[in-house]
Image: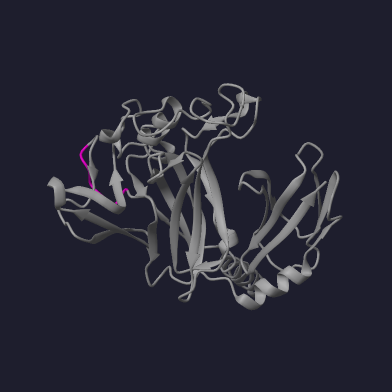
Amino acid sequence: MKKQVCSIFAAALMIAMQSFTVKAQTVSTFENFTLLPGSYWNGSAKPLGTSFRSGHAIFPNYFDTAYGGYWESGWAYSDMKDSTTAGPGNIYSSRSADGYNNSANYAVGQQSAIIELDSAGAGKVVEGFYVNNGTYPALSMKYGDQFAKKFGDTLGTSCHCPQNSYPDWFKLTVRKWYRGTMPNDSVTFYLADYRFGTDTAKDYIVSKWQWVDLTSLGNVDSLQFTLSSSDTGAYGMNTPAFFCIDNLTTEDSPLGIQNIEMANTFCAVYPNPAKDLVNIDLSKITDDNLKLNITDIAGQMIHTENVVSPSLISVDMTGYANGVYFVNITGTHTLINKKLIKQ
């Protein structure tokens, strides 16, 4: 009997100890807001500065009452499902006509929008979010409009490129604030990319929800979102400066700076530069829940895997273009960032 009780106690203790290694997460789904189907909230009921909250994230909003009233900056949230109507009258719709995984609500951001983390989320890791183009910018890039060009079209340019092969792009850059400073770290994601030369079959404008991994930024107090485009004019960017996000995911525990610095010294990436096979040695890392991601310089994920047992991992780079890549390993107490050159 005593042996059985001890066994039960030991098993319970093991389960309890294992639970401490699981990352607790909080997701900003925006489903905590009530909207009529096919409607949106843009701050008009609370003009001249307000915010809304979902999960551990706070989304500032500013609605200006001038000129009859308009959403000037920050964030709105939406249940709009119009993926086909072009023009500035449809700025609150996502290109997929819904939120991530067919959810009802999602958020719409403008140029230089900021997300602040509340007291429970500040100073901790933001895992990432799902992103999509809005219908207005997506159709503007696809067909052109009175303000912006059709992406890939060489009319009016002097690049002497074959028709429909102009290297256009529309990029989202995410940077962090942490303890009052903004480091140089950033994560980029191309909402549209036409930089493939005459191989126009590779050109794309994002129309489905895509995951953007922010774990490489480490601990975060707030995030800033900046849009840039190849299509610019005398007054700045011509591409409509809107984008949609959903399921922003924050971790409920920070990464220790000491652990980050030690982990970088314990991880070896070789040969570097590499021609084909690259080895990533994690055998000295004493951590759990490790995940390996490799991205190119444009922020596109080329390889990802969960590391069940820290060891030597080999990745075949033969099929990838020469250039700069980034190796990112995250864990419960680990954040590793290494630069990899492919020759």
Instruction: Give the main secondary structure of the magenta stretch.
Output: loop
Q: In the visual, does 192 lie left or right of 119?
A: right
The residue shown at (58%, 63%) is 185
111 or 218, nearer to the observer? 111
Q: Position of residue 295 (x, y in %)?
A: 66, 48
The single residue placed furthest to the front in the displayed view is 158
Quadrant in which the N terminus appears: bottom right
Q: Is residue 111 visible to the viewer in this orientation of the structure? A: yes
Q: Position of residue 296 (x, y in %)?
A: 67, 47
Q: Position of residue 169 (x, y in %)?
A: 53, 38
259 or 5, nearer to the observer? 259
Image height of 49 relative to 99, above or below: below
Residue 257 falls within the magenta-colored stretch: no
Q: Position of residue 138 (x, y in %)?
A: 42, 33
274 or 160, nearer to the observer? 160
Number of dots carrying numbers: 0
The residue shown at (82%, 39%) is 318
The magenta stretch is: 31-36
Image height of 79 relative to 151, above or below: below
Quarter holding residue 147: top left
The residue shown at (84%, 50%) is 274
The residue shown at (44%, 61%) is 223
